[in-house]
Image (cartoon, rainbow, N blue to C red):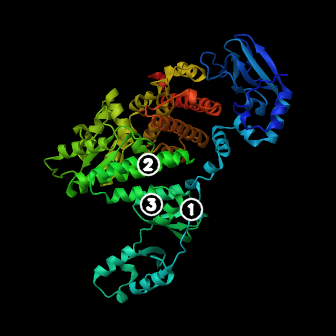
Amino acid sequence: MPTAFNFAASPFDCLTPAEQALVRDQVDIAYFRAGETVLASGQAPTHLFVVIKGFVQQFEPGDDQQAVASYGPDDSFDGRALVAGRASSRFVAAEEVLAYQLAHAAVNELIARNATFGALLFSDLSNKLGAIAERQSRHELQSLTLARVDEAYLRQPVFMDADADVLSAVRLFREKRTNTVLVRDGGRHGVFTANALQRAVLDGRPLDRLPLREVASFELVTVRASDPVGDALTVMVRHKVHRAVVLDALGAGTIVGVLEALDLFSFLSNHSYLISRDIAEAGDLPTLARAAEHITRLVALLARGGTRVGQIASLVQALNARLFERAWQLIAPADLVANSCLFVMGSEGRGEQLLRTDQDNGLLLRNGYAAPDDLPALCARFSEALASFGYPPCAGGVMLSNPAWRGMVSEFAERARGWLLQPTGEHLMALAIFLDAHAVCGDAALLAEVRARLFALATDHDAMLARFASAVEQFAAEDAHWWSRLLARDQPEREGVDLKKQGLFPIVHGVRSLALRAGVPETSTAARLDALVMAGQMERAQANDVLDSLHFFMDLKLKAGLHEMDTGHAVSGRVDLRRLSSLERDLLKDTLDVVKRFRRSLRSRFHLDQI
């Protein structure tokens, strides 16, 4: 029996010594000639195959022209067919193939003994990713940002009636050693804090006659006890508050405690809160530049600590929004800030940016507002400031400094209307960029107005929507080359692949196209997918696979970018396939297959074959 079986390859790298011995006892070797069918569609499989030498291609029933997947040395197939009882695809030797054969009974015994092996072998993408998480180190599994809010230090809620006076609340501060009192006023709750006490003093009325109702804030920021700590931190940053009221995990709305930002910061033991505070208190642009650098360090810290990539991106979006907002406040006069809306686009607008990339931003002005004469200079200064923070100028000029990306609401809405009515390649690109717009400073209602006008027009233009969606096919012709690169083991030094073309772009733009067609206003890919499912426009299983694939691609890009930074290279956005583990290569095939199937569904939905 073979003794050189590679137990370092997924999914066999999770087996115990006893389970490895079982494989050695049960495995055999098979030979297939070039062009020979290894496993036919509809056939009941008797073995799991593991390629030793050569390549095997997988074809869908009725389509012998284009392989949907390829398997090279150390890759295994078809675990799902073993479970289902018959193969749903045809597997053909692309050249002479040597492969291990592991009997069905042995595979069943391994699955019964080792749940992780089973998940990695035949489960769907989400379960495979879950199995990876279980295999990470204890430090990663217990990453503090993944801990529940109720595992952090919660302060016991202290309640008072809204009719109580401020002086009584201050006495309670001292008695309970707290600086936060929750105020009951009929069916609503508010909060009275030490900061609110300052307003009460400045009010001028005697504190023993001033009811809490008149000085408390009734716009509570809440989180659930079951929420991840990292999500709670993002909520505080986004709402610019130093505490959140914690509700019970069951969703009954019962207040169970108060989470203070300083307590949360102590729990996390990182600089997230300090970054947010430094941005808020920054009095000049150099201070903001230092904060931007700290954001990048925080991303590296969280990534290496095992934090989910979606959670990191959400926190980065919140911190960057604060950064851009403060920069604009330092540059623009207060009157301009109040009568405008600064917005960001691209991955920043979708909340999917991790490491700093090119600028994508714009500015809307309130109709009728007389903008200052030096508006062009102010916008140019803002673009220069972001460049000094490490956000390079956009090669396509999608920035405030470009007059095409600023203007009155009415003129910008007319410009966007032109993108729809004259759908040239350039206009459709501008439309795609703008659809991801997210307000970060000023009056967000200005952006909402332009977007509402745009959606009202877009849903009535089927031909335009089809042309818009057809961009998902832009890099489809490179699939075969991409797959050969994935399976090759001898790429030249530092040669990498661009996951944006084959992975990120078709997902992001495909979901964006579906959202535009359905009138979904959300900007993040995750929120768009949820809205599409709720509207009956997509099955939940497909939405989950698409989102899991997106996050997997983002995670690979982040790891590659951090490695480039650590080795003194500029972040290229490319991934070196040689650095991927066997399991990562396996998952990359799965996620690319999700992208292919998603493309096919888009072709059908938008009738792209007729364009």
**Secondary structure category for the residue under label 1:** helix
Give the mark, 2 or 3, whose residue is nearer the N terminus: 3
On the image, which quarter does residue 196 sit in?
A: bottom left
In this picture, residue 432 sits left or right of residue 413: right
Q: Residues within 10 Å of mark 2 (few under 14, many from 20)?
A: many
In this view, 424 is above or below 126: above
Mark 3 residue type: Met
Query: Which residue is rendered at x = 28% and y = 34% of the image?
Result: 397
Give the mark, 3 or 1, whose residue is nearer the N terminus: 1
Mark 2 residue type: Val
| Quadrant containing the N terminus in the rendered view | top right
Residue 511 shows up from this direction:
yes
Instruction: From the viewer's side, name the closer residue of 274 and 209.
Output: 274
In this picture, residue 158 sits left or right of residue 462: right
Give how far across and how far down residue 344 sits, in percent.
Answer: 35, 45
Distance Cα–Cα, label 2 vs label 3: 13 Å
Distance Cα–Cα, label 3 vs label 1: 13 Å
Give how far across and how far down residue 66 sits, in percent.
Answer: 59, 18
The disc placed on residue 316 is 2
Give how far across and how far down residue 195 sits, in percent.
Answer: 37, 73
| Quadrant containing the C terminus in the rendered view | top left
Query: Which residue is rendered at x = 35% and y = 51% of the image?
Result: 323
Give how far across and how far down residue 268 sits, in percent.
Answer: 52, 58
Question: Are the two marked residues, 3 and 1, in contact with CB atoms closer than 8 angstroms?
Answer: no
**Secondary structure category for the residue under label 2:** helix
Give the mark, 1 or 2, whose residue is nearer the N terminus: 1
In this view, 470 is above or below 456: above
